[in-house]
Image: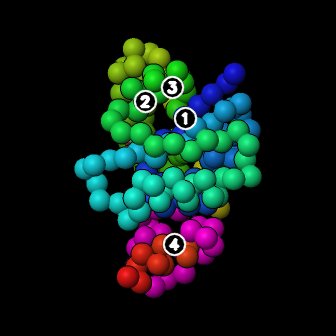
Amino acid sequence: MKEAIYPGSFDPVTFGHIDVIRRAAKMFDRLVVSVLDNQAKTPLFSVDERVKMLREVTKDIDNVEIDSFQGLLVDYAKGKNIHIAIRGLRAVTDFEYELQIAQTNKKLSDGNLDTIFLVTSLEYAYLSSSSVKEIAYFGGDITPCVPPEIAEKVHEKFSR
Ligand code: PNS
């Protein structure tokens, strides 16, 4: 069985992430999308909220599972006995950062965790969770960036 993990912050999930999830789900028998529970960051959404939102937007994809993890990705992947991580690449600016993480993970896992990059579809290349939050914070329209149910949740956060 071909399995992969797609790790990320997903704060919140965007059309760019969903595009990567759909494409990766076609390449693997099982795709585990996993939210990093990063104690060092203050996210807009809790891990539980992010997991719920991911479940909602991927409910029609049978071979996708949503999970969360703490600590190192290599330890999490080892625990699940999965040897491939998926990451999306939007632009050259992502590349250096992603390359370093991929190489670090390869080293830390004694060669057991490889990273496969999916080039983000052009229409989503400009998208990021941070820009979604900034646009929403200033009252802009985020409907081109996230599904309606996610847009509603983002607006709810900022209207409090
Ligand atoms: O969506 P993001 O914030 O770009 O995702 C980054 C993520 C979660 C893939 C990365 O930060 C990660 O895997 N963190 C877990 C800690 C870890 O394994 N670090 C070692 C690589 S430097």
What number is the disc on residue 80?
3
- The image quadrant that residue 74 belongs to is top left
Q: Which residues are magenta?
A: 127-150
Q: Is residue 116 visible?
A: no
Instruction: Point out residue 103 in the picture as x, y percentages from the top left corner.
Output: 40, 27
Q: Reply above or below: 59 against 106.
A: below
First in sequence, mark 1 or 4: give its number. Answer: 1
Does dot 3 land on a helix, a strand or a loop?
helix
**Going 41% across and 39% down the picture, which residue do you hit?**
69
Find disc 1 in the rendering and name its residue.
Answer: 5
Question: Magenta segment: does it hold 65?
Answer: no
Is there a contact, CB below 8 Å, between mark 3 and mark 2?
yes
Q: Reply above or below: 53 against 95.
A: below
What's the coloring here?
Answer: rainbow
First in sequence, mark 4 or 2: give its number. Answer: 2
Q: CA distance from mark 1 to mark 4?
A: 25 Å
Is there a contact, CB below 8 Å, between mark 1 and mark 2?
yes
Is there a contact, CB below 8 Å, between mark 3 and mark 4?
no
Q: CA distance from mark 4 to mark 2?
A: 29 Å
What number is the disc on residue 28?
none
Find disc 2 in the rendering and name its residue.
Answer: 76
Give amino acid for label 2: Tyr
Is there a contact, CB below 8 Å, between mark 1 and mark 3?
yes
Give amino acid for label 3: Lys
Mark 1 or mark 3: which is in front? 3
Instruction: Point out residue 66 in the picture as x, y percentages from the top left corner.
Output: 56, 45
Q: CA distance from mark 3 to mark 4?
A: 31 Å
Instruction: Point out residue 55 in the picture as x, y percentages from the top left corner.
Output: 60, 53
Find disc 4 in the rendering and name its residue.
Answer: 153
